[in-house]
Amino acid sequence: MLDIRGLSKSFGGVKATDDVSLDFADGSLTAVIGPNGAGKSTFFNLITGALRPDSGQVLLEGVDLAGKSPSDIVRYGIGRAFQVASIFPSLTVQETMLAAVCADQRRSTVLHRRFPLAETRDRAEHAMELLGLANKRHRTAATLSHGDQKLLDIALALVLDPKVLLLDEPTAGMGTEERWRMIDKVRELWEAQKITVVFIEHDMDIVFKIAPRIVVLCYGRILATGTPDAIRRNEAVIEAYLGTEEHAEAVT
Amino acid sequence: MTELQAGRASETLSAPRIETRSFRSRYRDILVALVAFAVLAALPFFFGSKALLDFVIRCSAFGLFATSLNLLVGYTGMISFGHGMFFGLGAYGFGLLMQRTGVPIPVAFVATLAITAVFAAIIGAICVRLKEIYFAFVTLAFQMLIHSTILTWASLTGGDQGLRGGIPRPVFLGIDLANHVHLYITSCALLVLGLLLMRQIAQSPFGYTLRMIRDNARRASFIGIDVWRAKLTIFVLAALFASTGGMVMALFVSGAYPEFAYWTISGEGIFINMLGGVTTFLGPMVGTVLLLILNDTVTRFTEYHGIVLGLVILFFAIGLRKGLMDYLLEWYAQRRDGRGERG
């Protein structure tokens, strides 16, 4: 279980994350929503070690990860994909996967053998198939389409066999149809891998349809958490985020 | 056939290939190295010209240096402007050990590498956390520090006169480095062995870790790679090969001079990499041969050789926008693709 307790982070006088406490049950799927600047990405950055929290705890199965380095936190089992696909442009899809498994097996500093290592093959292969990238294995990452680059980014997180997968706007920069394909993929991965998935999403249709549980952030604070129905009816959310009641009804 | 089946089919095809490919690539490299060494070693029997052998010895020294710089620049994306300090350190360390302690040559060789490793680890620990231009400038600053230390510590280093009086070369294992052909063969052996080792580094899992850091260091840390440690490791490894180049140079000129540790050596290393190209392993080696040929021929014809070399680098930097080997590789890839489409 991922248990966040009293997580806070300020930039200057601005509280980007303000005393956030949340828990994510094993195998749960949660959407994080909130207006621009609500502190969604900061929240992810604090959990994954990209930023050091001012105070609070990030407990994964009872171990406090707050303040540890990104590479350490990954090893504890929190994987992450980025809003702008973060990949290795000059490596091919297959090389990317093989090298990532190498890193996960603590073999990234091996000098006396040749890349790729045979023992990294199966996991790399498995991840490519899961994300539907197997037939593009020899393509250089830079030449992939935007959608495939996002998939590769997710594959990079998934190939490490994380316990928790954080997806920062998996559908960012996509057209409507592509968005749905991507989010179906995310749901499919969640069901198949039985891991804890937390994703940030802007598209309300997608959030309400896909996520069993929704967290609403606003000005770095938790405004509400609950099922889609509860969130839709929550007055604070309607006021602060969804705007008017008419909008809320339109979403329904 | 569904996509999944297609995926499985390609898996069964590629599964054994990965293992055999790794083995094959290593044996191919060793074979290439052996053939290259055999050709170089046979050279003195066909061409008695001392100038040619001298040229190859200088190529060995600068080739080791430039290729090791490419491990930083091309493979890891660390543009060091101070890599020449390890070339100088190798030359002075080896020269001083031979002059002052009288240990056998292999002992001095290993001891110099150890000294270089200590220096590189300390300097690297300070530098590798810095990004791009800051890394470049701080490495340059360390280079100047070492250069001015050599100039001012005259009682040890001979100051601006350099290490004079020649480097003693006691015979070891039947190798007499005072003999020109012996020196030549030893230089070639060090070059080929050094290149083979660096090739192994570049093609190892660690080599791919370096490529990931070059492409996207932030992402590399998010898949669990300790970026700082990896950068420090390659900084020290590259320094060892640069130091070896410096030792070859010290043996060649039988001394060591402050210019070996001056920043212009680092500049020449960057220059060679731009000439030969950084995307292929042998690019810097090709660049070394080009630069030395250019140097030797141009200086013979004009005293304005600086201008000519400047024009050449402008041609590569602005005209081709890449090094010679990069250009050839791209040209070859285009030709192959073109043929593939027609076929």
Image (cartoon, rainbow, N blue to C red):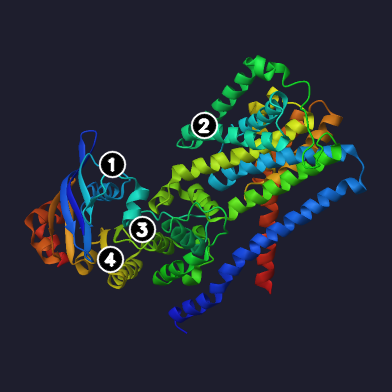
Amino acid identity at mark 3: Gly
Q: Which mark is residue A156?
A: none
Q: Residue at x 33, y 45 (%)?
A: A50
Q: Earlier in the sequence, mark 1 or mark 3?
A: 1
For the N terminus of chain A, the quadrant is: bottom left
Q: Which mark is residue A195?
A: 4
Q: Earlier in the sequence, mark 4 or mark 3?
A: 3
Q: Are the residues at dot 4 and dot 2 in contact (C-beta closer than 8 Å)?
A: no
In front: B159, or A24? B159
Give the Cα distance between marks 4 and 1: 25 Å
Q: Is residue B271 something one can see in this rendering?
A: no
In front: A16, or B22? B22
| Same-subunit check for callouts 4 and 3 | yes
At which x and y percent is residue A38? 21, 48
Determine which residue is flagged by label 2: B123
- Front position among marks 3 and 2: 2
Q: Is residue B38 something one can see in this rendering?
A: yes
Determine which residue is flagged by label 1: A52
